[in-house]
Structure formats: structure tokens, C-alpha cells
Amino acid sequence: MKQLITNILTTSAIALIIVALIMLIVFPLYDVIFGTTVLKIVGANIIIHVGLLITNKIESKYLILDLLADIAYTSAVLIVFGIIFDWLVVTPVWALILMATLIHLIVLFLNTSRNRNEARKINELLKKRHKGR
């Protein structure tokens, strides 16, 4: 079920990017808010993910510190993009921080669930292999 949700969200994101690009190509003379906003969000996500690749190489022995560092970095990127693209006019800083926190908690939940499923499958395979001996 969680993989289905991940697939749906991934497909939706790809569709939004394609729609945004098409809108910008088809209507280049108009101020297409949707198209440019989606691309700005994609840009922010690229910077967030590249930064997280770097910060994830530095691990603390405390999971909560890693999570807080990731949330702080993501929030900082969103605030900088908010300043650059005037998102803060319609979205307060606390909402950006809340959004970053919720995203990281959802991802943590999905990753934990996936890891549990993988561990369960591996244990089942080991039990089958052990019984075969």
C-alpha cells in the first residue's frame, strides 16, 4: 500500500512538471503562475535533495539530531526560495517549517515501513533456507 502511495505521488509530480513545461511552451507570453510555481518547487526540491545527499554523509549516533538537521536544512532552503520568489507574501515562515517537518516525518514513516517489510522478507528467506539444510 505504501509503495502504491509512493508511486501515485511520484507519477503526480512528474505529471505536474510536464504540464508546467507544456504551459510555459504553449503560453510563453502569459504570466502562467502554475507553470512557473511548479518549476520553482522542483528547483527547491533539487537543491534540498542534493544538500541532503551531502548532509547524510555526516551521521550522528542520534536519529533525532539527523532528523532535526534535515528539517532545518529543508526549512532554510524553503525560506530562501520564499524570499527570492515572494512565497512569503502568501505563505508564512511557520507554514514552510511545518511543511518541511511534515514531509520529513512522512518520509521517515515510509522508509521505516519499507525497512521493516524488507527485514521481514529477509527473515522469512533465512528461515526457509535454514529449514532446507
Image (cartoon, rainbow, N blue to C red):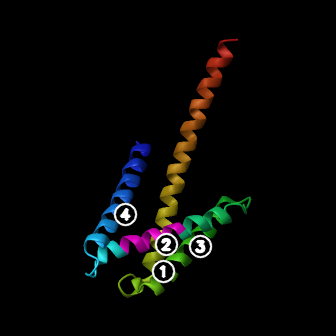
Q: Which residue is mark 1?
A: 81
Q: CA distance from mark 3 to mark 2?
A: 12 Å
Whole-percent x, y for residue 115 in the image: 58, 43
Is residue 90 placed above or below 72 in the rendered structure?
A: below
Q: Is residue 122 left or right of residue 85?
A: right
Asked whether the residues under the numbered discs 2 and 1 touch, taking CB atoms below 8 Å apart as contact, a structural biologist would say yes
Give me the residue at 55% from left, 68% from top.
48
Crowd tier of the residue under label 2, counting other residues whose Cα lies within 10 Å: few below 14, some 14–19, many 20 or above: some
Q: Nearer the viewer, mark 4 or mark 2?
A: 4
Q: Nearer the viewer, mark 3 or mark 4?
A: 4
Q: CA distance from mark 2 to mark 1?
A: 7 Å
Q: Can residue 37 be seen in this snapshot?
A: yes
The kind of residue tagged 2 is Ala
Asked whether the residues under the numbered discs 3 and 2 touch, taking CB atoms below 8 Å apart as contact, a structural biologist would say no
Q: Which residue is mark 4?
A: 17
SS for tag 4? helix
| Mark 3 vs 4, N-terminal side | 4
Q: Is residue 127 magenta?
A: no
SS for tag 3? helix
| Mark 4 vs 1, N-terminal side | 4
- Magenta residues, start to end: 37-46
Whole-percent x, y for residue 75 in the image: 53, 75
The image quadrant of residue 15 is bottom left
The kind of residue tagged 1 is Phe
Give me the residue at 67% from left, 65% from top.
54
| Mark 3 vs 1, N-terminal side | 3
Q: Which residue is mark 3?
A: 73
Whole-percent x, y for residue 37 in the image: 36, 75
Crowd tier of the residue under label 4, counting other residues whose Cα lies within 10 Å: few below 14, some 14–19, many 20 or above: some
Is residue 15 placed above or below 20 in the rendered structure?
A: above
The kind of residue tagged 4 is Ile
